[in-house]
Structure formats: structure tokens, C-alpha cells
Image (cartoon, coloured by chain):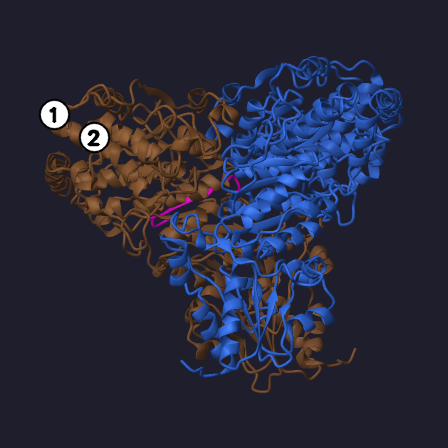
Chain colours: A brown, B blue
């Protein structure tokens, strides 16, 4: 092959050209082989990705977990080949055959980048917009690391987003927040290719993106020539300067470049096989022989150039090791704390909870939780905030608001941006030095659901504190009264939905949550509830099993099961039933998933060999697996004071007694 | 009392001043009485709302459903007193006592405005950001009305948003879209009060909102003095000019004005009682006597001024009636169609489906649905589009893209904005002249969930077409493979989640859906499925009951129940079971909610008096109510081709047979 500077410029050697040309051709080749996949963006941005991985990013392919590395986030996750090709060339463990195997079952190169599956992939992306917000969270986590510990590294987060990401609300929320908190260690590269799946962007996306980001407070840079490595490098180097503001780098690319104009620059280049003719044209344009296969595309020269990144990465790590030793010597306390908090360990031990006072009387579980949050915050390892309802959700803590001006700030004000909040938590959790939490009203967990799903998929132990957890919130009415949120989050794989019944259960739930490796949605009452569980023997162990017998009776004819604020309801109903000669058992069930994980014998013992009536002020769907009848709410709430609303919707002691009666076929004395 | 022009300027009479002063004081008075609620914004924007309702908006209090009216959307729904006070003054049916009863159970004045509950409330708001997007949808519906029929009215949509709405992603998405499609009949009034619940906006929201909207393509206007009616009126009149772009009107208000500076302009004014001292100060500032009660605040003069809107409204309707008669005479066909399509009737009759061809062989249900969509689109009464996946979701139809330049366009390109899409559909449905539909991948229904919840709460018959409805989507991997979406949407009150099994069921489901008055989420397969139901007698009636017996057997030992693409799985498993001497029944269950609504006798008959095994490629949670065992997927998907993924996750004929065997305690011949 011969070097074709007219197609890709700025290469410093024949070898470099070969690497970039191969990176450009490989996506087209791989997608043509498979008949499906996304080649166009991976082709068009190959020079950009090459420049990032070979010239600009500080990274070390043989140490993908190196704490000093820059982070790369492919928010436009469908263009996964863009990243896989660079991970292959730079030596993260992928080989050319892995590119050929893209999108096949069991491959290291699935359709979208998956965190934990492919070395060098920092975050699972695909649902558009999420990566932008994750990158903001990573920038927060890294900025905080430097502020708290004075570590000698100051990594930059590089995110690549397409027009799709830019249209999604979660990215808008996160971008506005990033500027407010001044995350100047964040560079967002916007692939301005003017093409989406259905059409050119002038049919659905005509805004001036650069002006929008300027309005948020971002710095704007532009890559003049998307096909010239030097042009790209110049802008990216400027982008990583610390200026107090995040930087948007626009790159006008032609999707599918260098295919013919009947393909490149059109929606056809977004997904699907280019066709044999287009592939031939692409190969010819890049200087490859007709019919070039994997070995020709990725020849020894190209691979050798690409893998030179390994040695450069090793050198970076060596330098960093020396700096870290020096830093450790001069900052022994910070270094000890930093090492302790490296990801993988339990960041906060349950002993922190020992000093949290129990409630002496009726108290909302959100209030009890507020004491826990304050105790956790004192560790300095618990970091997050609220979507503008810190006081209502009882997560207000003393200290400073986090920003670039106060990077060791104790909490973050997310603004009224629930979706970005959860996605930013995901980013903070990916950096891994803090246990990340956020808070919102329970009904608005709907807004953050897509980001929580990704936390679950990545197994990130974020904590989403959801208060005002039933229709008992009252006056704000049905728009603010959760009904289906508990059930709908329980349907989501990999999320622990936790709903403690009183202050003792709040603390006991946290003991298990602190050791958890998956995200938790913690549901808490707005209204005060009675204290019922403080005297339970081995409460921590019982709660950790998800459900346990609160009150047993050898002659029980019925098991009443409840969660959260409804435990007091079944407790009262149980007393009434007992008083008329119907002995019952009471089961408290703060977390259905924890209970699901228990052995059959435990679950059978808890449920008992009598009919089970489950009671929860929410959609009934969750409970039929274990209950013979469910008293819940399968309609929307109504406006009014909480007690009246609960009574109107049938969540009363009397209703529990009547349902029990019906279930047992009894007629009780009136 | 004496007129205090220094507090509120531009009043043209003592009576007008009394009305505005009362509108300003009433929220503070009502919230102080109750001890809870949101007074600050309702006070600060009282002059704005007064000017809108008394001077600018075309409306008729005695005809709240008048088709020619402007629409008012209070996106900042917590400030509901702002609207209630104007509805009371202008004569929509509320009386001063209703203001006093705000937020009490059963009142006409609930915590947030509720559509269908209070005359004059156009849309239920409260979840922030939604109203902005609903307003965009209303503007679309009204622009389309004028284009299709040439009706003589050209209403303006007026929306009021606070900083909270402006931070939510759904509003950003909708604002970008509104400019792209040029909705110049939309005026969004941004209450720039720099205060949210937790803090001043400089802690979480520092962007330049006006510049952001300019970047979208909006026109920017500003009200110079939020306390001067003439200043407000001047800007609002300019705002309603048709210029080809939507208009943002900024109004710098002081939340809680005219309270003292220790309250007004601070987060304290956002919610909660102002306290007796502040209330006294507010009353004094406005010129009311100390301790003024409801009768003093709303005296005869104020009420007389306010209710003068009734006569003006009657005159507007009279003029309009004449114009409509003239229009009807000259446009009889359009007028007939317009009258037919007025809200409340079934917009599209099921006979439209008669010509939809059945599939002759294996076919994806999304493809069958594509034929339905095209047939419905031919009626001209079916309007919507896709979040940039029209081809994949098979909703592509012939015609022009809707915009201000093509207001009779056949479809809307929503862009990659699922959340705004659903909220815009809600707005179109509120105008009510089109059956509104949108489409996205099933997994991304998570993004639009908060807007769908409001469609359900308002009982708007939107159709959300969700294709690629199981892990069988394959190569795109777990981020694109729905698992919990079916179950989690079934948990939502008031949404019909419909999942037909083949092309005949697709058509049969639509027959019921066309008559529905609630939102539908229609789940469709990406992959081809076998045709199994075409020969079922009375298929339409059977499907309309939500579940029905597809294959009966008098000696059945088991009922196999399935939805969608899993019906072919249980059909094959049933054959295998029968072949080894285990007779089984097969139940197809396209909509669980429709089934829930059936009489016990029907449901019992369908399920049979034998064990029930439910099979669905998704979270099992939905089915335990009716099934003894459930074969489903309670973990995330995996990347790979669809068939391998289904097999890996245990959704195979063999697995169905084994689960059946286990349920019956059988050992089958191998």
C-alpha cells in the first residue's frame, strides 16, 4: 500500500499512516463481514481516536486500572468499533481476530462497550446521553481525589458524543451542571456529523450546539480538519488545559469517510453493511489492495506502531510510581487513606453506624436516615447530594458545596436534574474513591431510571435515597404520590430496593447496604411511623435476609407481611385479629431481593405454612410470588392529607382485618 | 385600602389594583392558614397571571372547552395557587372559599393543577419540565388544526416555567425540538427568580438560559418590570406575534414579593407558611388592613373587576361562532371532518383495519404493525412519529415531515428525545384532534416513563410503540435488550401494556386500542415469529379480553400461558408435551390489564383448573398473580445473536418442557 496523505493527513511515518488507515478501514470491513453493526462513525472518527490513544491521552495499555490514567468514555456507544480498534492497536489485550468477532456471542467485542468485560472500557454505554453524564461524574470523582489527597496525577476525562447524545435530556442536564461546578478536567468531543439514523439532523436537530454549551458556561474549541492528525492533536492539547470550565471540542466529521458520497455523509452510513462496492472503494481510497483481509489491513507495521503505546504507557506508570512514592513519603496520612479507598474494598464499615441514635418515639424513616447520612458523611468517604430537595429528603449535611473552587466540598448540589444526578453518581462510583449517593422524591425515581439501570448493569454500589415513599405524602397529590415505583424498580435486575419500617430497620438496612456491591434504592417515609423493631433479637441478621418474623405464634392461622410504613398497619391489625381469637404472625420484609436470595427453607419458615397476606402502599405486583392475597394500591393517588388519602385508597387497619377475614373465610365479630 | 402603585404598577383602575393586590396576597394568606403549600411564586407572578388572564389571553371563563381559546400551561405546577386565583377571579367556577380550601381532600384546588378536575386547568403538572414539553405538543396540535382545516382561530399556547423546569432534561429536549419545527404559536414564560428549594440558583444553575434558548433557535423577549402590568402586557403582546420561532419571555421576579427581604427572594419563600409577621407585612405593603380575611382580600370591587372577563370571553365566543359559521359554509368538508374529530369521540374506527393484510408466513410483529400504522395514517387522524428509529420500529409512512413550513406534514421527527416525544404526544392528545403515537425501542421506554405516567393520570389515549421487545434483539447487547420494561410498565396504573403474539393479534389488539381512552404501550418483536392465531374464532373478542384459550384440551393437566414471541415457544412445547402423553392447554395473553378487568368466571375459565405455567422473555413479576410458576428472565441480557441469547437465558422449548415437568412432578421420557 502507499501512503495517501490526501485521505488522512498529519501522519508522522508510513507506519502511523498504516495504523490510522487500518483503524479507518476495519469498522467497514468488520461490519461488511457480519452484515450488521455500526461502521460510519468508527471510520470517520478513527483519526481522532488514534490521536487520542497515540498522542494525547495519558494511559498505559498494560495497566488498564492505573489510577493516574486519563479516562475515555464513548458516549456514542454504538460506535464501539472506534474504541475496540484502538484497544487492539495499543495493546489492551484485543487482537485483530477480536475485531473480526465483533458482536458475536461470547466475544470480547460486544455491540456496545461493556464495563468489566473488555479491558480499557471504562464504562458501559449505548443508551444515548448517559456517557456524557457519566463523564461529568468521573471528572467530579477525579477532581475530588486530587483535592482530598493531593495525589500527583490530574487525569483528564475524554468523552465522545454524537448528535444523539446531544439531543438527550440527561446530557443537557449534566452539561449545565458541569459548567456550574467548573469541571475543567472534562473534555467532551462532539462528533458534528449532521446525520442520525432517520435523517440528516436538519430535520430534527437544528440548534447551535456550540452556542448552547457556551450558554452553559463551557469553553468551545473546534478541530479544523477531522482527517488530519496534527489538526486534531493541536486542538486536543489545548482542550486539556485547566481553565476553570469544561471544554467542548467540536469535530465536523463525515460519517463513513472515506466512502463514496452516496454512502458517506448519509444516514446509510449509520448502521448496516456498507456493501461490497463501498468497501472496495474505502479500501482503495485508503491505499489497501482490493479484497484486503484482516492480515493485510492490520499488518506488522501498523501493529508495531500501535503497540508502541505500551512502552510509552509503561514509562508513564514508572514516572507516576516515583511521584507516588515521593508523595506518600511526604503525605503519609493521605497516602494511607488513598490506598484504603482504592476501589474494590468496602469504603465505609458498618461500625460507623454504632453511634447513630435510635428514635425514642414516632419518627419518619427519612429522619432516622438523616442521622445515618450525617454519620456516614463524617467518614469523608460518603459523597453525593440531592436534586434540590436536600432538606425534604433529610440528607442536608454540614459543609461546603462541591465545585472547582471548593473541590473538597462535602456535598454536591445536583439541581433539579434527577436523571443527571444518578448518571453522575455512576461516574463517581466508577472512580471508586467515594460511596456515592443521591436523593430525590420517590415518585421521581422515574426520571433517573435509565441511569439506575446502567448502575445495575455495571454493578456500581450507588445509593439512591427516595423519600416521600407512598401516597401518604398527601397534599401534593397524585403527581407526587408514588404508587408503582417500588414494584417497577423491583422488576429491574440488580437493584436492591430497600424499604425499612422504622428507625432501627433503617440502621440495620444500612449495615447490609454498606457492604453491597450493587446499587440500592432506599425508600423512606415522609410521615412519622411507630417504632416496632428495635427489640428484635439479631435484627441486623434478620434484616439482611430481606424478610423475617417480627412476631410469631405457634397457632397462627395467617401471616401478615408488610414493608415500611405499613408494618405499623399490620401490627395494629394483628392485635385486633388476636383480640377476636385469630392468632397471626407478622413478617417484616424490607428487601424482597435479599429475601429472594435466601434458601427455600428460610423463606418457607418465614412465610409459614398458613395463608400469607401482604400489605404495601403501592402496586401489588411484587408480592403475589409469596402471598395468597395482597392489599395494595393499583390506582393513582388522590390529593389530600396523608391519613385521608391512605384511608381513601383502602390502606387502613380495618381493611387489613377485612382482607384477612376474607382470605381465611371467616366472619369476625363486629 | 388605598392603591399602592409603588408595589404593583400599571393598574388602570382602583378595581384592577384590588384584583391584582388580592391575587398577590391570597397565596400567602392561604398557605399561612394551611401551614403548607407554595406561596412565593404565586405571589411574585400574580401581576403576570393577572395580565395574561385579564388582558392578553383569548379565553372565555364560561366556556372552558371553547376550541378557539388560548391554552395556559403552568409547568411550575407547585405554584398552582397562581392559576387557581385567576380561575377564581375570572369566573371559571372557583370561588374564594375554594382558594381557602386549597390542598384539602376533595377540594377543587389540589396541590398541583389536575386536568379534568378543575375547569380551566388544561393539563396536569407538577413533575417539573413536563409542562414545557406538553406545551410544545399543544402548539403542534393547534398548528396542525389550522393547517388541516383552515379553522379561523389560531390560539397561542402560554406556558409558565420556573428554574426547576428549565433544569429538567425533558424541557431541554422539547425546547430544542420546538425551535426545529418552528412553533411560533408557543410562548414560554420563564420565571427567572434565581431561587430553588435548596438554595439560590447560583449554586446549581448558573447557565445563561436566554442564550441557551437563542442557541436552540428561540426568540428572546424580556419583561422589564415583573410588578408592572403595562410592562408585562407590552412584552406578552409582542410575544404572541407569529415570527416563525417560539418565544421565550424572561421575567425577573422576586419570589414572595412584596414580603420583607428576609423572606422574599430567598429559598424560604418557595414553600411553607410565611409566618404571621411576614403575612402582616405583605398585607400592609399591598394596602390591606391588618388581619384582613378572605372577604376583605376578595372584596366586591376586586371580584367584579375579575369577573368582567366573563363578558369579554362571551364576546370572543360570539365572534368566533360567526366566523366558524362562515368558515363552515365555505369549507363544508373540512368543517364536517373538524366536528367529527372534536375530542371525546373515537377518532379512528376499527374498520380501517379491515384492509390490513395478514402475514402469510413468519414475520416480526413490528412489521405487521407497520402495515397497521400505514393504514391508520391514511385516515389523516393518526399523527406522530419516532425518536429517530422510524425505520427500525416500522412506523415510516409516506409524506412530509411536520414543521411550521409544512404544518400539514404527515409525521413528526422527534429526534433522539424519547422523553420529550411522549410529553409532546400528551400535548397533541390534549388538543385532541389526532390519535397521537410515538415509537422507540422498548428498552428506552425507561426514558419516557415520567411522561407516560402523566398520560395515564390524565387518561390520554396516546400510543407508544415499543419495538425490539425482548432480549432476542440480540447483538446490541444488554443495554438494548429489554427485560424489566414490560413488568415495570404493567405496574403503572392506567397504562395498557399490549404485547401481541403474531400479525393477527397485532390487528386484533389495535381494534381494541382504537377504542381505548387510556395510553397504550404496544410491545412488538424485532424478530420474525410464527403465525398462530389467525384461525382463532372470534379473535377480536378474545384478544379484547386480554387473555384467551388458544388451544384447549378436556384432559389438560397444565395451562401454558404466554405473550408475544413466546407464544410460539409454548406452542412448540405443548406439542412436545402432548407427544409424551401430557395434554396441555395454551393461553395467549396479549394484555394483562384487559384480563384483570374480566369477571372472575372468565378468568377462571381461561386459566383452567390445572397448574398454570407462564412464559415471557422478561421479568417474571407480572405473572405470579395468575401462574403457579413463571419462566422468564430476571437478569440482564447478554450480547450475541438473538437465538443464542434466548437460549443462554433459558427461553427455549426444552426449558418450557422441563419447567412443566417440574411443576407437574413428572419425569418425562427423554
Q: Where is residue A14 in the image (x, y as percent from the top left)?
A: 12, 26
Residue, far front: B360
**Chain on which label 1 sits:** A
Quadrant of the rendered image containing residue B449: top right
Q: Quick one: quadrant of the C terminus of chain B?
A: bottom left
Residue B267 visible from this viewpoint: yes
Q: Which of A63 and A372 is in front in this view?
A: A63
- Residue bearing mark 1: A13
Q: Nearer the viewer, residue B240 or B21?
A: B240
Q: Are marks 2 and 1 in contact (CB under 8 Å)?
A: no
Marking on residue A20: 2
Q: Label 2: how many residues lie within 10 Å, few (<14), some (14-19) or many (20+)?
A: many
Looking at the image, is A592 positioned above or below residue B409?
below
Quadrant of the rendered image containing residue A543: bottom left
Q: Which residue sits at x=22%, y=19%?
A: A6
Q: Which residue sits at x=50%, y=56%?
A: B484
In the image, taking residue B619 as reference, residue A154 lies left or right, namely left
**Chain on which label 2 sits:** A
Q: Earlier in the sequence, mark 2 or mark 1?
A: 1
In the image, taking residue B171 as reference, residue A81 lies left or right, namely left
In the image, taking residue A18 as reference, residue B452 lies left or right, namely right
Q: Distance between the residues labelled 2 and 1?
A: 11 Å
A129 in the magenta segment = no
Residue A185 visible from this viewpoint: no
Magenta residues span A378-389
In the image, taking residue A463 as reference, residue A42 lies left or right, namely left
Q: Nearer the viewer, residue B274 or B368?
A: B368
Looking at the image, is A22 positioned above or below residue A530?
above
Amino acid at each position: 500500500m502507499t501512503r495517501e496523505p490526501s485521505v488522512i493527513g498529519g501522519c508522522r511515518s508510513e507506519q502511523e499512516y498504516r495504523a490510522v488507515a487500518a483503524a479507518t478501514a476495519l469498522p467497514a470491513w468488520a461490519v461488511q463481514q457480519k452484515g450488521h453493526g455500526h461502521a460510519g462513525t468508527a471510520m470517520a472518527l478513527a483519526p481522532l481516536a488514534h490521536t487520542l490513544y497515540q498522542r494525547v491521552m495519558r494511559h498505559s495499555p498494560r495497566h488498564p486500572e492505573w489510577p493516574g490514567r486519563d479516562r475515555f468514555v464513548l458516549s456514542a456507544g454504538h460506535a464501539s468499533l472506534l474504541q475496540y480498534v484502538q484497544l487492539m492497536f495499543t495493546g489492551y489485550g484485543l487482537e485483530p481476530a477480536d475485531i473480526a468477532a465483533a458482536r458475536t456471542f461470547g466475544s470480547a467485542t460486544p455491540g456496545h462497550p461493556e464495563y468489566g468485560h473488555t479491558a480499557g472500557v471504562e464504562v458501559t454505554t449505548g443508551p444515548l446521553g448517559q456517557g456524557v453524564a457519566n463523564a461529568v461524574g468521573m471528572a467530579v470523582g477525579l477532581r475530588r481525589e486530587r483535592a482530598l489527597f493531593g495525589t500527583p496525577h490530574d487525569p483528564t476525562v475524554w468523552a465522545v458524543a454524537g448528535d444523539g447524545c446531544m439531543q438527550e435530556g440527561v446530557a443537557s442536564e449534566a452539561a449545565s451542571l458541569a459548567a456550574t461546578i467548573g469541571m475543567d478536567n472534562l473534555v467532551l468531543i462532539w462528533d458534528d456529523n449532521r446525520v442520525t439514523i432517520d435523517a440528516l439532523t436538519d430535520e430534527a436537530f437544528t440548534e447551535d450546539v456550540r452556542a448552547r454549551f457556551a450558554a452553559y458556561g463551557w469553553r468551545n474549541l473546534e478541530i479544523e480538519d477531522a482527517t488530519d492528525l496534527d489538526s486534531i492533536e493541536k486542538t486536543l492539547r489545548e482542550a486539556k488545559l485547566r481553565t476553570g470550565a469544561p471544554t467542548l471540542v467540536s469535530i465536523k466529521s463525515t460519517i463513513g469517510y472515506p466512502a463514496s458520497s452516496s454512502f458517506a455523509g448519509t444516514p446509510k452510513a449509520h448502521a448496516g453493511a456498507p456493501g461490497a462496492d463501498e468497501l472496495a472503494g474505502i479500501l482503495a481510497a485508503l491505499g489497501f489492495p482490493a479484497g484486503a483481509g484482516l492480515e493485510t489491513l492490520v499488518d506488522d507495521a501498523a501493529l508495531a506502531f500501535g503497540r508502541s503505546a505500551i512502552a510509552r504507557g509503561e514509562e508513564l506508570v514508572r514516572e507516576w510510581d516515583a511521584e507516588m512514592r515521593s508523595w506518600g513519603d511526604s503525605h503519609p496520612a493521605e497516602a494511607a487513606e488513598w490506598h484504603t479507598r482504592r476501589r474494590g474494598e468496602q469504603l465505609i464499615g458498618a461500625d460507623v453506624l454504632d453511634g447513630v441514635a435510635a428514635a425514642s418515639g414516632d419518627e419518619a424513616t427519612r429522619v432516622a436516615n438523616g442521622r445515618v447520612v450525617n454519620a456516614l458523611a463524617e467518614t469523608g468517604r460518603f459523597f453525593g447530594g440531592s436534586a434540590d430537595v436536600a432538606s425534604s429528603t433529610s440528607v442536608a449535611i454540614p459543609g461546603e458545596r462541591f465545585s472547582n473552587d471548593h473541590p473538597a466540598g462535602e456535598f454536591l448540589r445536583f439541581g433539579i436534574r434527577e436523571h443527571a444526578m444518578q448518571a453522575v453518581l455512576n461516574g463517581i462510583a466508577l472512580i471508586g474513591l467515594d460511596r456515592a449517593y443521591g436523593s430525590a422524591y420517590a415518585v421521581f425515581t422515574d426520571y433517573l431510571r435509565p441511569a439506575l439501570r446502567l448502575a445495575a448493569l455495571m454493578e456500581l454500589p450507588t445509593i439512591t435515597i427516595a423519600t416521600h415513599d407512598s401516597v401518604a405524602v398527601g397534599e401534593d397529590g397524585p403527581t407526587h404520590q408514588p404508587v408503582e415505583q417500588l414494584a417497577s424498580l423491583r422488576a429491574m435486575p440488580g437493584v436492591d430496593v430497600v424499604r425499612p419500617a422504622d428507625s432501627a430497620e433503617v440502621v440495620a438496612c444500612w449495615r447490609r447496604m454498606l457492604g453491597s456491591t450493587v446499587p440500592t434504592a432506599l425508600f423512606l417515609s415522609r410521615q412519622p411511623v411507630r417504632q416496632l423493631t428495635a427489640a428484635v433479637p439479631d435484627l441486623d441478621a434478620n434484616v439482611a435476609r430481606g424478610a423475617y418474623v417480627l412476631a410469631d405464634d405457634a397457632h397462627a392461622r395467617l401471616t401478615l407481611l408488610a414493608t415500611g410504613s405499613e408494618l405499623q398497619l399490620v401490627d395494629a391489625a394483628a392485635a385486633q385479629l388476636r383480640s377476636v381469637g385469630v392468632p397471626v404472625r407478622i413478617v417484616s420484609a424490607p428487601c424482597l431481593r435479599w429475601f429472594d436470595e435466601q434458601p427455600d427453607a428460610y423463606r418457607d419458615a418465614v412465610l409459614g405454612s398458613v395463608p400469607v397476606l401482604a400489605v404495601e402502599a403501592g402496586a401489588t405486583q411484587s408480592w403475589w410470588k409469596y402471598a395468597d392475597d395482597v392489599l395494595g394500591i393499583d390506582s393513582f393517588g388522590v390529593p389530600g392529607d396523608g391519613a385521608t388519602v391512605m384511608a381513601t385508597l383502602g390502606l387502613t387497619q380495618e381493611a387489613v382485618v377485612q382482607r384477612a377475614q376474607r382470605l381465611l373465610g371467616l366472619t369476625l365479630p363486629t
